[in-house]
Image (cartoon, rainbow, N blue to C red):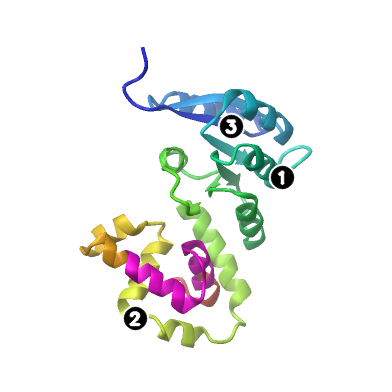
Amino acid sequence: MSPAFPVTRVLLVEDHQTLAEALTIAIDAQPDLECVGAAGSAEEALRLARTRRPDVVLMDIHLPGADGIAGTRRIKATHPSVRVYILTGDATPELFAEATAAGATGFLAKDGPLPDVLAAIRAPARGRTMVAGGTFTALAAELRRGGREQDGNEENWACLTEREREVLALMGEGLGARLIAKRLQVSEHTIRGHIKRVMAKLRVHNQREALIVAARTGLLPGRR
């Protein structure tokens, strides 16, 4: 008998056995999730992806042989619909850029809360990069350190309206348009309009780039 709800199939790529076992147990304990395999290398992950057909891959960045970036790139090349989340303990702008270019869907802290991992697995693909709270905070901090010498911060900040700044700040908390609309008690259509204007004023192509620019130039309220 098939389950009453769809089950998300997860492939875990982690060479630390204790962590791999803990994540496998946690995933399999969820009625809507199933760990279909655990690999200790990118090469093994690619082989398992062919036969187990996962919906989501949790990919450690530090692996023997090819690293998690190369593993992500190879899996996305052969299985483009698979969502790959990078597990990392050292988020950096360079890693963020490389992993995103390789096709990663999001970034999760290896020592972060288990609910963050489970929420990411369950989250539907919406064409945007997800960064868990703790990882985003670390990434934003490093981007700010690297961008303090840049000119034009005041000009960039001044070009945004108060409501656009508010929307940008909520984007920085990881909220999508629907949740921002609920928080601000306006329509989702209105929020999407604000997001488009924020991206246009910051001269970026998507929400991920908007957050990177905002973090680098100190535009996120309370994050200067």
Which secondary structure dominates the residues rendered in magenta? helix
Q: Which mark is residue 12?
A: 3
Q: Mark 3 or mark 1, which is nearer the start of the sequence?
A: 3
Residue 162, picture quadrant: bottom left
Looking at the rendered structure, the secondary structure element under dot 3 is: strand
Q: Which residue is mark 1?
A: 70
Q: State the residue in front, 22 or 82.
A: 82
Tell me the kind of residue under disc 1. Ala
The Cα–Cα distance between marks 2 and 3, rounded to whole angstroms, is 43 Å
| Residue found 55% across the figure and 24% down from its top | 36
Q: Magenta segment, which residues?
A: 192-214
| Residue found 59% across the figure and 32% down from its top | 12
- Tell which residue pokes out farthest to the top in this image: 1
Q: State the residue in front, 130 or 115.
A: 130
Q: Which mark is residue 161?
A: 2
Looking at the rendered structure, the secondary structure element under dot 1 is: helix
The Cα–Cα distance between marks 2 and 1, rounded to whole angstroms, is 41 Å
Left or right of residue 48: residue 137: left
Left or right of residue 121: residue 146: right
Up/down of 182 relative to 55, above or below: below
Based on the picture, tell me whether residue 24 belongs to the magenta stretch.
Answer: no
Based on the picture, tell me whether residue 203 belongs to the magenta stretch.
Answer: yes
